[in-house]
Image: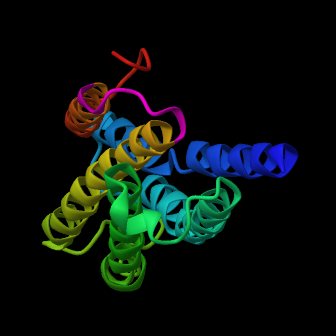
Amino acid sequence: MVEWRAFLLLVHLFSTLAMAAPLYMLIVVNERARFGVPLGYYTDRYLENIIRHNAIRCFVFQGTMAASGLGLVHATGRGWSALLAEPALLIKLAALLLLVGLLSYVHFSLQPRIESLMAQVKPDFPPPQGLAPQLGALRLRRKRLSASCLFLVLTALAMGLRATLGYNPYLALGFVLVGGLYAWRAYRRPVPLGWI
């Protein structure tokens, strides 16, 4: 049983690590802004391809996190009621559900609108007049949601560790606050030195 729990924990942590996608989407978007060049087919199509294709990977990682997390609850003998009775598990579950909801909104609603605008950008031709502000508004919304997702991933990680290690709730709150500050920092500007 210890081996099964270790396996589930490893899969769960690997899935959480892979959910660093919101951070890297913020990095990609911030790096694109540093170019300072106007909307262009090759640069912006490349950016959108990276972001668009990442959603499916994120859904798979979220599903893996959910399955391995439920397996861990069972393997530790907590019982399914612990998902609602233990605050750390409840917050972790809520964070995961919000992550799935936000990713679904981006993938099924926001990204198709961005793609329809990008379809008007052709190689070797200037973009249509007024397209850049429309695209910029949608990208800004997506960027804000990505920062929110990063915060939720870090919150889920802190709560998962709290549920596993049982450390002080105030320390867990401190981790969540630091995660929020980091998500805000990554949203505001590039993070060339990782944490800084």
Asked if one can make out residue 124 in the rendered structure from this viewpoint, the answer is: no
Q: Which residues lie in the magenta part? A: 164-170
Could you say which is closer to the camera, residue 22 or residue 83?
Answer: 83
Indicate whether 119 appears above or below 160. Answer: below
Indicate left or right for 116 with 66 as reference.
Answer: left
Asked if one can make out residue 34 in the rendered structure from this viewpoint, the answer is: yes
Q: In the rendering, at what x and y percent does residue 162 appear?
A: 43, 37
Indicate whether 119 appears above or below 81. Answer: below
> Which image quadrant is residue 133 in?
bottom left
Kindly identify the residue that appears in the image at 42 percent across and 42 percent down: 23
Determine if the magenta segment contains residue 165: yes
Q: In the rendering, at what x and y percent does residue 130 appear?
A: 13, 72
Could you say which is closer to the camera, residue 57 or residue 155?
Answer: 155
Q: In the rendering, at what x and y percent does residue 176 appear?
A: 28, 36
Kindly identify the residue that appears in the image at 56 percent across and 70 percent down: 59
Could you say which is closer to the camera, residue 37 or residue 49?
Answer: 49
Indicate whether 88 appears above or below 77. Answer: above
> Which image quadrant is residue 174 in?
top left
Determine if the magenta segment contains residue 57: no
